[in-house]
Image (cartoon, grey):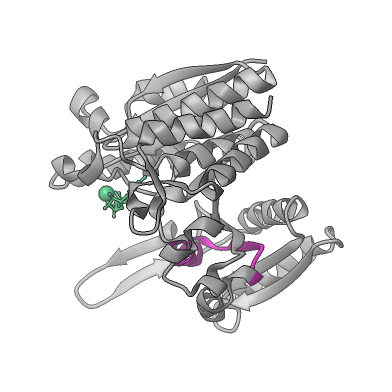
Amino acid sequence: MKKRVAVLQGDGIGKEVTDASIAVLEAIGRRFQHEFEWKYGLLGGVAIDKAGKPLPEETIAICEESDAILLGAVGGPAWDNNPSHLRPERGLLQIRKHFELSVNLRPVQAFKSLLAVSPLKEDVAAGVDMMIVRELTGGLYFGEPSHHDNDKAVDTLLYSREEIERVVTHAFELAKIRRNKVTSVDKANVLESSKLWRKIVEEIAEKYPDVEYEHMLVDAAAMKLITYPSSFDVIVTENMFGDILSDEASVITGSLGMLPSASLRVDGFGLYEPIHGSAPDIAGKNIANPIGTILSSAMMLRSSFGMLEEANAIEEAVKNVLDAGYCTSEFKEIGRNILSTTEMTEKIISEIESKT
Ligand code: ATP
Ligand code: MG
């Protein structure tokens, strides 16, 4: 059956990297006999310029008619001084809220040929392959009351059983198709919400006897991420802890351009985007690394479309191209063969096609 994908290219390098992803997905379609339909919508700065707001109704309609959303990146200096309702990033927050994307997935993987750019020692970064599962629509960032005056301020860390159950269940399901290990991160020695979190993790763990799990305090987890990162498989945590830990973990690979992400609704609908921003400094030069977005589209195949073999084929192709010594220009100090955005995309496509 034809899969409809809403493509929101956004700003800066967003167009270049989503074009790359679409070309790769087309190649997957040819190899595995799938048909994709692309529906383009405006989001971010480009939407502000053309439609007067960061998330136009028409874009919401396009996404609602689609099976998944592929996003480039939003933002840039042109809109930095806009009032808050006319900021590009606002469109992204609105879309997450509108589609109830409550589970955020951020895989972090260290590629063998690129270990030299990691800020960690090569033997520490080697073998890193983790999935951070972050609750995205609850917790401290959304709890009420939330206000401040000159002398006092309040934020509320509120979680319902249902919110915790859905993200923790997702983490255990993922562990089953990975290495069967879940690390649940909390601050249960201090926070009441973490005590409920821990209790629910234990209840859910009972349904997954083959998955090993542990609890870890967030401060300990922050240390272990840089001392022994390869010990993690799936990490599951609440919104703010996940925000901080996923950024910490992302530097292990040494380049923002490599990393994908997914934000999912309970029914499997999702938004897929690289973790990097719009990179205005390199936009339009055909040098951006498209791999973060290409790997995001692999996540789309796996999580929203159930196409596991197809997702593996993309990830395998990326790995083979990197292992063969190819990379994009941000690796020029260590790279042997520097490719442009379109050349890297072509290499990955030939790798996919060579297996047919
Ligand atoms: P945000 O948009 O979240 O505020 P930011 O502006 O801090 O993020 P980016 O736009 O991601 O960050 O850019 C940070 C740096 O990383 C820039 O120098 C940019 O050129 C580089 N960079 C980001 N993405 C890529 C990519 N895909 N390929 C190569 N370099 C990239
Ligand atoms: Mg930016």
Residue in the image at 54% along x and 63% along y: 238
Residue in the image at 46% along x and 42% along y: 291
Q: Give residue 217's quadrant in the image.
A: bottom right
The residue stretch that appears in magenta: 231-252
Percent position of residue 304, x then y: 63, 34
Q: Is residue 81 left or right of residue 253?
A: left
Q: In this view, does 301 lie to the left or right of 156?
A: right
Task: Tell me, yes or no, if residue 103 can be seen here.
Answer: no
Q: Nearer the viewer, residue 307 or 137?
A: 307
Residue in the image at 59% along x and 64% along y: 128
Residue in the image at 49% along x and 65% along y: 249
Identity of the residue furthest to the bottom in this view: 189
The main secondary structure of the magenta stretch is helix
Percent position of residue 322, x then y: 52, 47
Q: In which quarter of the image is the C terminus?
A: top right
Q: Quadrant of the N terminus?
A: top right
Task: Tell me, yes or no, if residue 223 can be seen here.
Answer: yes
Looking at the picture, does residue 166 appear above or below residue 130? above
Q: Give residue 206's quadrant in the image.
A: bottom right
Percent position of residue 31, x then y: 65, 21
Residue 239 belongs to magenta span: yes
Residue 41 belongs to magenta span: no
